[in-house]
């Protein structure tokens, strides 16, 4: 019984505290779990290398091509789409399909990273060395699979309230063209700016900075370009 309400009848009774909606939805919890697994696998070393004179040493996914940096940034975008109630219940197709698209992109990127690692191991043989993939790489793949499957289930469940058909209108075409142009310009700007600020740094720091800034400005440029392109197409029609 709420004794506060008995003493002060004009005041509303206190509502019991509830967990955030994201923590009460099994599908969203699965997505969050997959993103956590993906994040752990991404942050840990991916390869174990042995070379004459250096013995064993570990190589992270942020070195060489910097694939781990891209995975981490994609995971953060998927986390925002999953955690936000507004994005999760949105009727905008790209927001609803966002986790699925990101999961597929992560799997593709990990496939590229796997091929690069195999080629790298083969090149080590010329120097008398060898290498192998650590379990953390496979854990990252497992997380990407969980995200992809959960994202597909979300798209399937939202098919009744969201239309995934691309309308052929001036606004849609203008937004698509503007988004692609903005993403390209943002990516180029990120690479250029990061290169200027990290000139002379070690390869790992330089690569990570370039990847993070390029992807961030790429997403920002895509959003600005899509909004501007759709707005221009709408004003021309009027």
Image (cartoon, rainbow, N blue to C red):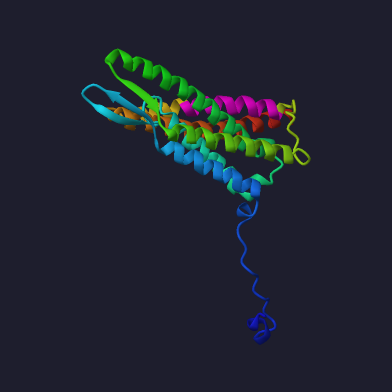
Whether residue 236 is visible:
no
Indicate the position of residue 234 as horizontal and vertical percent values. 70, 31
Q: Judge whether residue 179 is colored magenta.
A: yes
Tally of marks: 0
Query: Residue lying furthest right in this view?
Result: 160
Query: Residue lying furthest left in this view?
Result: 53
Q: Quadrant of residue 166?
A: top right
Indicate the position of residue 157 as horizontal and vertical percent values. 73, 41
Whether residue 22 is visible:
yes
Give the quadrant of the N terminus. Answer: bottom right
Give the quadrant of the C terminus. Answer: top right
Q: Quadrant of residue 231?
A: top right
Query: Residue lying furthest bottom in this view?
Result: 7
Nearest the viewer among 177 and 103 is 103
In the picture shown, does residue 153 fall above or below 84?
above
Nearest the viewer among 28 and 199 is 28
Indicate the position of residue 203 as horizontal and vertical percent values. 31, 27
Nearest the viewer among 109 and 45 is 45
User: Does 93 sit left or right of 215 as displayed?
Assistant: right
Q: Quadrant of residue 50?
A: top left
Q: Judge whether residue 159 is colored magenta.
A: no
Indicate the position of residue 201 as horizontal and vertical percent values. 28, 30
Give the magenta part as a residue range. Answer: 171-187
In the picture shown, does residue 50 fall above or below 91?
above
Q: Residue at x 67, y 76 (%)?
A: 13
User: Does 147 sit left or right of 216 as displayed?
Assistant: right
User: Does 88 sit left or right of 52 as displayed?
Assistant: right
Q: Residue at x 35, y 23 (%)?
A: 131
Most prominent secondary structure in the magenta stretch? helix
């Amino acid at each position: 019984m709420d004794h506060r309400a008995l003493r002060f009848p004009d005041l509303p009774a206190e509502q019991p505290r509830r967990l955030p909606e994201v923590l009460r939805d099994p599908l969203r919890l699965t997505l969050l779990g997959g993103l956590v697994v993906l994040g752990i696998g991404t942050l840990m070393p991916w390869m174990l290398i042995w070379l004459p004179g250096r013995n064993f040493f570990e190589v992270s996914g942020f070195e060489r091509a910097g694939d781990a940096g891209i995975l981490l940034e994609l995971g953060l975008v998927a986390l925002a789409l999953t955690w936000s109630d507004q994005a999760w219940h949105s009727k905008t197709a790209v927001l609803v399909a966002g986790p699925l698209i990101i999961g597929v992109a992560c799997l593709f990127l990990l496939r590229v990273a796997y091929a690069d690692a195999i080629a790298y191991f083969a090149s080590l043989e010329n120097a008398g060395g060898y290498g192998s993939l650590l379990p953390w790489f496979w854990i990252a793949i497992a997380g990407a699979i969980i995200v992809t499957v959960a994202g597909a289930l979300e798209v399937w469940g939202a098919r009744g309230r969201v239309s995934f058909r691309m309308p052929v209108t001036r606004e849609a075409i203008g937004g698509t063209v503007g988004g692609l142009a903005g993403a390209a310009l943002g990516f180029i700007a990120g690479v250029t700016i990061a290169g200027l600020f990290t000139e002379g740094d070690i390869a790992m720091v330089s690569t990570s900075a370039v990847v993070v800034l390029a992807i961030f400005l790429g997403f920002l440029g895509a959003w600005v370009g899509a909004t501007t392109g759709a707005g221009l197409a709408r004003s021309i029609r009027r």
